[in-house]
Image: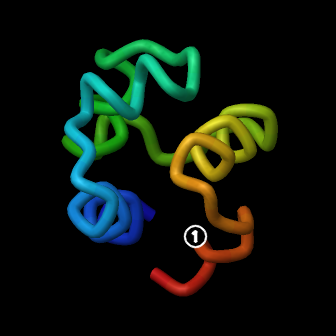
Amino acid sequence: MWKVIERLMKEKGMTPYSLAKAASITKQGLYALRDGRTKTITLEYAFKVADALDVDVNEFRKG
């Protein structure tokens, strides 16, 4: 899932900080996902990230 988020952030010109702020989540949560310390996320978290990236949540399933 992180690969998809990373690609979308790059396409949108976003940093982890700007994504975290837009999604109202913590940078630490994003970094935990990136580093593999978090294997699963809640549906609410996925929707927040998807909304901040302006994509459908199903986009994450492609990665």
Q: Quadrant of residue 48?
A: top right
Residue drawn at 42 percent across, 13 percent down: 26
Residue at the far right: name it: 43
Image mark count: 1
Image location of residue 62, percent across then percent down: 55, 86
- Residue 1, relative to residue 32: is it above or below? below
Residue drawn at 25 percent across, 33 percent down: 16
Q: Quadrant of residue 63?
A: bottom left
Residue drawn at 37 percent across, 65 percent down: 8
* Residue underneath mark 1: 60
- Residue 19, relative to residue 11: is it above or below? above
Task: Report whether 17 appears left or right of 24.
Answer: left
The colour style of the image is rainbow
Which three-letter amino acid code belongs to the residue tagged 1? Phe
Quadrant in the picture for the N terminus: bottom left
Task: Report whether 32 appears left or right of 19.
Answer: left
Query: For the residue labelled by badge 1, is the local secondary structure a helix, a strand or a loop?
Result: helix
Residue at the far bottom: name it: 62
Image location of residue 2, percent across then percent down: 35, 58
Residue drawn at 30 percent across, 16 percent down: 28
Image location of residue 11, percent across then percent down: 28, 69
The answer to which of 49 and 29 lies nearer the viewer is 49
